[in-house]
Every structure is written in C-alpha cells, then in structure tokens.
Image (tube, rainbow, N blue to C red):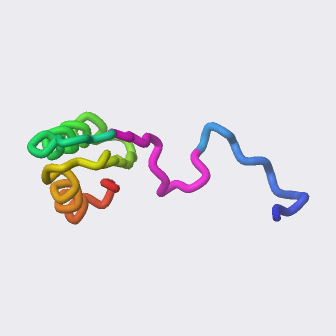
Amino acid sequence: PTSPNASPRDPREPQDQGAPRVSVVAPAHNEAGNVAPLVDRTAQALASTPFEFILVDDASTDTTAAEARDLAATRPWLR
C-alpha cells in the first residue's frame, strides 16, 4: 500500500536499485565445454550493466549441468 501523498515512481527507473537491468536466458543441451566461454564472454560484454544470467539445462546427458553449477558457485549473477 502506498500513501496517497506519495509521488509516483518514474517508470524509467528500476524499482529495486540492486535489481539487474538485463536478464540473459540461455538454454543449453549437451554443451559441456561451451558453457564457461558463453558465460564469461557474456559477462565481459555486459560488464558495465547490472545483469543476471539464467542458464537452463535442457536434460543434457553430458556434464553441462555440473559445469553450470560449478560456475554459479563463483558467479553470483549466474543462476
């Protein structure tokens, strides 16, 4: 609930200053060996922008999911 005297929020400004401005969602199926370069190159490209990277493992039968978990342990913006 907001106060009737509250000024409206500027829609161009994020509601939560800690929230990412960009969300990258990437599906991955049997991409072991490619996950780390994808994640790191994306992070380099977005270095000046608050972002999150959501990597979705699509039932890989290789080590894609394990590699993604290992990367996420040291990259708080990777989910």
In which image quadrant can residue 34 be found? top left
* In front of the other: 21 or 40: 40
Left or right of 49: which side holds 11? right
Residue located at (30% from left, 38% from top): 46
Residue located at (34% from left, 56% from top): 79
Where is residue 66 drawn, in percent x and y? 18, 59
Where is residue 4 drawn, in percent x and y? 90, 58
What is the tally of numbered marks visible in this picture?
0
* In front of the other: 37 or 19: 37
Q: Is residue 17 magenta?
A: yes
Residue located at (18% from left, 44% from top): 35
Where is residue 8 drawn, in percent x and y? 78, 47
Quadrant location, the N terminus: bottom right
Residue located at (38% from left, 41% from top): 25
**Residue with the most extreme top position:** 45
In which image quadrant can residue 49 be found? top left
Left or right of 44: which side holds 25? right
Left or right of 7: which side holds 45? left
* In front of the other: 7 or 16: 16
Magenta-colored segment: predominant secondary structure: loop
Q: Is residue 77 magenta?
A: no
Where is residue 21 drawn, in percent x and y? 47, 43
**Residue with the most extreme right position:** 4
Relative to 2, residue 40 above or below: above
Q: What segment is highlighted magenta in the picture?
A: 14-26
